[in-house]
Image (cartoon, rainbow, N blue to C red):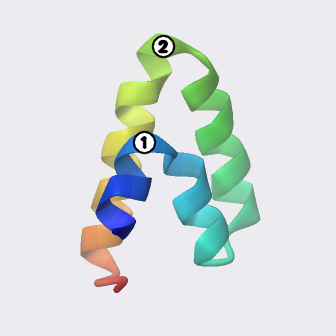
Amino acid sequence: MKLMIAFIFPWSLFMTIHKPVEATICLMLQISILGWIPAAIWAMFILDRDQIT
C-alpha cells in the first residue's frame, strides 16, 4: 500500500514518516510534471532504504 502512495502522492509518504521538510520539498517537485518523476523515485528510494511497512 505504501508503495502505491509513494508512486502517486510522494509527498504524503514523507508526512507519514514524520519528515515535514522533505515532504515540502517533495511537494514542490510534484507540482511540476517533470519534477513528479524524481519525487516519486525519491519517495520509493526512501521507502526501500528505511524498510517502511
Q: Residue at x 35, y 46 (%)?
A: 7
Specify the label residue 33 is tagged with: 2
The secondary structure type at the circle numbered 1 is helix
Residue type beneath disc 2: Ile
Tell me where residue 6 appears, x and y as whole percent: 40, 54
Q: Is 29 left or right of 51, judged from the image as shown?
A: right
Tell me where residue 2 appears, x and y as whole percent: 38, 68
Q: Residue at x 57, y 15 (%)?
A: 32
Determine which quarter of the picture holds residue 26. Answer: top right
Binning the other alpha carbons within 10 Å of mark 1 as few (below 14), some (14 to 19) or many (20 upward) gives some
Tag 1 near tag 2, CB within 8 Å: no
Q: CA distance from mark 1 to mark 2?
A: 12 Å
Q: Residue at x 60, y 56 (%)?
A: 12
Q: Residue at x 66, y 53 (%)?
A: 23
Quarter of the image with the C terminus is bottom left
The secondary structure type at the circle numbered 2 is helix
Relative vertical location of residue 4 with respect to residue 48 in this rendering, above or below: above
| Residue that sits furthest to the front in the current view | 1
Q: Is 3 left or right of 25, judged from the image as shown?
A: left
Tell me where residue 1 appears, x and y as whole percent: 34, 68
Specify the label residue 8 is tagged with: 1
